[in-house]
Image (cartoon, rainbow, N blue to C red):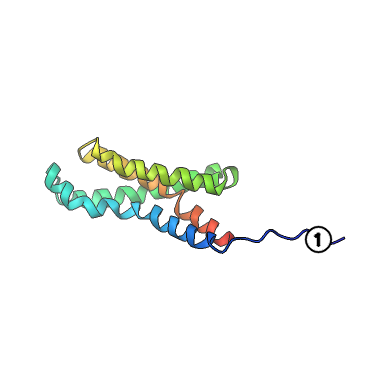
Amino acid sequence: MTEPQERARPARILPVIVLAQFAGTASWFAGNAVMGDLQKAWGLAPEAVGWVTSSVQVGFIVGTLVSAVLVLADRVSGRWLFLAAALSAAAFNAAPLVFEGLMPLLVFRFLTGVALAGIYPVGMALAASW
């Protein structure tokens, strides 16, 4: 008896994963791209840039730790986890359009970092599996 043939994987999938990963992780830097405009519009101090940048980093660390403790990568399909994280990061990036001020900005940038923990590591695992 012959072994079942492994289903051929389409060659287009890996570039799509890489492009999705690139697009998803772009939210990491989106805050810095608009910080100058936010400083002018909201009257933020120059040190706000450091706080905003740090809040994303801390969010990523917290999100990665929570994901590891809850073993999310083993409990949830990587595709769905990646999708949910990418949509969440997009929503958190858009939230300062509605909620103005430094504190909401810091909270939403922190949450963007948490969401990025479901984009970068999961996307790398998906890419490695192809």
Residue 54 is left or right of residue 47, and the answer is: right
Residue 111, image x and y in percent?
Answer: 36, 42
Return the x and y of residue 22 as percentages of the image width and height.
40, 58
Residue under circle 1?
3
Q: Quadrant of the C terminus?
A: bottom right
Graded by Cα atoms within 10 Å as few (under 14), some (14 to 19) or many (20 or more), the crowding at tag 1 reads few
* Residue at 54%, 59% in the rendered image: 13
- Three-letter amino acid code at the position of disc 1: Glu
- x then y, percent, for residue 81: 51, 45
Q: Residue at x 50, y 53 (%)?
A: 122
Above or below for 116 versus 14: above
> How many tags in the picture?
1
Q: Quadrant where the N terminus lies?
A: bottom right
Residue 70 located left or right of residue 20: right
Residue 96: image location, x then y, percent: 25, 40
**Residue visible at 56% across and 45% down in the picture:** 71
- Residue ranking furthest to the right: 1
Judging depth in this view, the residue of 84 and 58 nearest the camera is 84
Q: Is residue 67 left or right of residue 41?
A: right
The answer to whether 52 is drawn above or below residue 97 in the figure is below
**Which residue: 40% across, 49% down?**
60
Q: Helix, strand, or loop for circle 1?
A: loop
